[in-house]
Amino acid sequence: MSIPPPAGSVIQTPGAALVNTGPNARALVSLLRPQQWTKNLLIVAVPLVVAPQAVPGHGWALLTATTAFCLVSSLVYIVNDLYDADRDLLHPVKRHRPLPSGRVSRSQALVLLSALGATVCGGLAVATKSGTLRPATVGILVAYLTMNVLYSSRLKHLPLIDVFVVAAGFVLRSVAGSLAAGIDVNAWLNLCLYSACLFLFFGKRRHELASSSAGQSHRPALTNLSVPFLDHLLVLTMTLTLVGYSFFIWSSMAHPALTVALTYPFALFGVVRYLQLVLLEDSGGDPTDTLSRDRALLGTAAGWVLMLVVAAL
């Protein structure tokens, strides 16, 4: 005689995903990936670097834009996981995400998606009507959402295009921050940012291609790439990042010569150190983890910020 499992328990069958028999609040929160919200701090960081004097007068608009991007990015993550649940089962880490593991059912995810979508729409309508957000900022949010839905459904499977689309998301955050703060969009800063994101994501693709024999089955976009080709792209995007950074400093800073002299060595060492980690130490699989754990990179970032402040005095 078999004894039925208690409510809310997890059942696992050989070769199948975990099946959850009850709701799991922690898993629902995990589906939103709040740990990824830190990427949206770029919305505030750009005005702080370009025009810090504009930030105090536009604090509420910047907070609203950042919150909106956090909610929209969570919405995108749910859409992405709904598309990729079966494929994520092939990945040794992603198979433990809420949907492929079964801790959250598809119906639960769809309910959460609908509720989040309604919240975003209502919040943007109120923010626009009250004048907190400019229509252009809302347009950037809509463009970000549309681009990422297309990415989740199709573009993520196309070699190179997938990386370019992900990097574009960070440029949209930068533009949204400039618009929310009421300052001009800086083309050189966005070139630097876009190239830097490509640099990081090409390093991630290289790590995936070099370290996993199952990588191509999990990520079809790897099929037409090779490690030597990605090595060339890393060097190219590293160079473009440094060029964009140099022109940004010369076009935007009050003391460009001093700022370049003080900060460029830190910027150069930072990208070279990251290249070393990717090519020689088999790192870069998670750019955020690599950037936050390497002591040399953390020290370089601290030194860069300090020199930037000194140059501005």
Image (cartoon, helix red, strand yellow):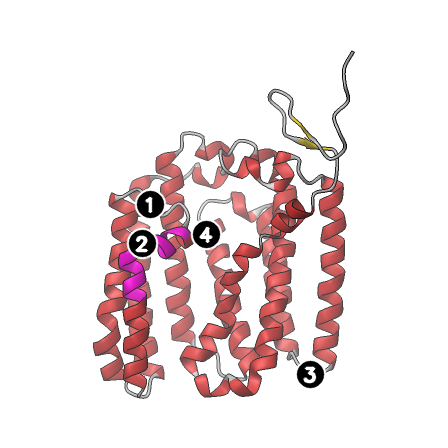
Residue 69 sits above or below residue 109 on the image:
below
Residue 256: image location, x then y, percent: 27, 83
Total marks placed: 4
Residue 85 sits above or below residue 140 on the image:
above
SS at mark 1?
Answer: loop
SS at mark 3?
Answer: loop
Which badge, 3 or 2, is on the more N-terminal residue? 3
- The residue positioned 49% from the left and 33% from the top of the image is 92
**Mark 3 residue crowding within 10 angstroms, few (<14) / some (14–19) / many (20+):** few
Residue 294 circle label: 2
> What residue is disc 4 on?
163
Which badge, 3 or 4, is on the more N-terminal residue? 3
Q: Would residue 290 be counted in the magenta stretch?
A: yes
Residue 239 seen from this side: no
> What residue is disc 3 on?
131
SS at mark 4?
Answer: helix
**Given the image, on which type of amino acid does mark 1 rest?**
Ser
Which badge, 3 or 1, is on the more N-terminal residue? 3
Which badge, 1 or 4, is on the more N-terminal residue? 4
- The residue positioned 44% from the left and 34% from the top of the image is 215
> What residue is disc 1 on?
283
Residue 188 seen from this side: yes
Left or right, 255 with reference to 18: left
Q: How many angstroms separate mark 3 from mark 4 (CA)?
A: 34 Å
Q: Would residue 108 be counted in the magenta stretch?
A: no
Residue 16: image location, x then y, percent: 63, 25
Which badge, 2 or 4, is on the more N-terminal residue? 4
